[in-house]
Image (cartoon, rainbow, N blue to C red):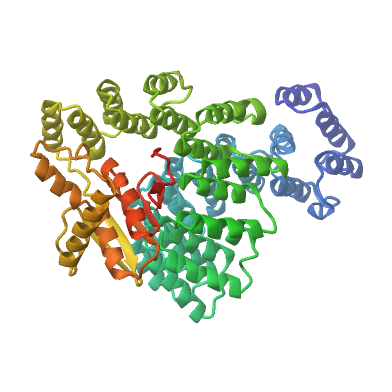
Amino acid sequence: MNSLLLSRARAGGLSSRCLFFLKFTYSSSSSLSISHQDTSYLKSRYQFSETTFPHLDGGPYSSFLSLLQACISAKSISPGKQIHGFLVVNGLGEDTVLGTKLVNLYSLCNCVAYARQVFERISKRNVFLWNVLIRGYAWNGPFEEAIKLFYGMIDVGLRPDNFTFPFVLKACSGLSALKVGKEVHELAVQTGWESDVFVGAGLIDMYAKCGCVDRAHEVFNKIPERDVVLWNSMVGAYAQNGRPSEALSLCREMTLKGFRLTDASLVTVLSASADSAALPQGKEIHGYSWRHGFAAHERVGTALVDMYAKGGLVQNARKLFDRLAEKRTISWNAMIAGYGMHGHAAEALALFDEMKRTGSVPDHITFVGVLSACSHGGVMDEGWEFFNSMKRDYFIEPGVEHYTCMVALLGHSKRLNEAYDLILSMPVEPDTGIWGSLLSSCKIHKNVQLGEIALQKLIELEPTDAGNYVMLSNIYAQSGNWEGVIKMRTVMQERGLKKAVACSWIKVKNQVHAFLAGDTTHPDSEKIYTELDTLRSLMEETGYVPDTAPVFHDVEDDEKLNILHSHSERLAIAFGLISTSPGTRLLITKNIRICDDCHAFIKHASKVVQREIVVRDVNRYHHFRDGECSCGGYW
């Protein structure tokens, strides 16, 4: 091998061993070939299996194809770069087939910039090559590049195939680019690929990610030959968009059509049931998984733990957790988070200790659950210790979600200035969750000054979120600053923002009953308000005194009492009391934070009626029993 080629190879960063390989190969024959000695070295050095070298004793071209395929299979970027350098030195760097292998390797190893450079140097580009690079960007980003390549492919006269469309649709999903997604859909129709199962699954996923689940179902209905993946895609579309009933119905239809549900099907629909607290659907899936042997599968078992925890049955979740034959980190995370959201900080931290004793390694999600449990339980000292332990003991850099937990913990403990100082010292940029947590704490402790700062930051990040303005307006009202209240309302009117309507709902006999504040539209409204009047009288005898502070209106006290009396969660509870037998546990879900007086009201009510009343608000679960709440005053 001449000195020029050697110097070029060294400049390319090739190892001394690889330089020896190049020199040996070049000098032993006028044509490119790979000897048995070099093959043995590469096998031992990069641990390639025997089956990846079927043609090494043949011609040099097939040998390099085999070597690159071995690198692709093992995702071995270092030897791939060395082979690439050798190909460039010997004039094969622009070969279409070998170049496609290189583009594939670089894309798989998340080196898309290198893949693009190889792509640009290949003059004869076929559909497969374009697909490989589009896939690289669709997987690794930036997603915009995948879309640009797609249109560039069309511009040069190439026809997309049933692999092109799923890749570019994945990029559209990542960007929630509905307009582009619709254009790609139209091209799929024009080229005859709309009914393909791969393209169909991509279209369903794209429409689901963009919130157009009905369009996704239209695509699903147009595909006559459906496979399990396509069914799962449609189930996932319903699940992602908060429609667990449709997801479960589709699972039933899927089994009637002769398809066996998979782990992916069950995990998807269980996740939907958990997020919507749709316990009846979740329990039905639990029964199916038990009858068909899925409950023993770790993924399904973990999904069941998560579903029961989010559905308010944390004890059921723990029983299922204890039965898991294999507990991976994700399983521990689900149970720790479940305890945290229910305010069982001691149980969450005890489980974390048990996790460490078993040798399971916590990850960043584990610490989100642990810190959240500390926040919900007001466990300050332990919270700081866990926060510091992340980096010190596990080399995990705290992320914005961990800082959010700490801001909430400090804020709920009345240490608002410390919370603000922590935000200012963060190495990562504070997001809406951080400032929203501070603003919420300012409302609890009536800190107008920091509340105004938090709101200004939130306006910069999300100027159209009406809830932030309402929060500061409520802080003004608490302090008696009615001019500030008027100012906030005026700003909201000028910007066309409307306050979210508080709503609570309860499920009785498999039917959901929803209530708004002051609602009189329910068929049993008269009975509901009569029950509330009776309940309030009994509670006042036990010491309940209404607190009108949560009524942020400049009206007389009597009017404030009437407003409090008709809060949506109270109406839902009253309906539950008249619609279920004595002793039945009530589960109420509310779309915003429960107010201070309703919290006190339900504590007294649980003692008077001798029932467990569970309220899931936007922050957490509250378990009211015998006049106490599981939150201990932290929410």
* Residue in the foreground of this view, choosing between 94 and 161: 161
Decide: is 631 above or below 455: below
Residue sitting at x 67%, y 46%: 98
* Residue in the foreground of this view, choosing between 443 and 455: 443
In the orientation shown, which residue stands out farthest toward the front?
541
> What number of labels is visible?
0
Left or right, residue 384 beside residue 633: right
State whether residue 558 appears in this view. yes
- Residue 191 picture quarter: bottom left
Residue sitting at x 50%, y 63%: 198
Q: Position of residue 616 (x, y in %)?
A: 37, 51
Q: Position of residue 444 (x, y in %)?
A: 31, 32
**Which quarter of the image is occupied by the C terminus?**
top left
- Residue 102 picture quarter: top right
Left or right, residue 237 beside residue 332: left
**Which quarter of the image is occupied by the N terminus?**
top right
Left or right, residue 24 beside residue 154: right
State whether residue 162 appears in this view. no
In the orientation shown, which residue stands out farthest toward the right?
37
Q: Position of residue 66 (x, y in %)?
A: 76, 50
Decide: is 613 above or below 138: below
- Residue 11 picture quarter: top right
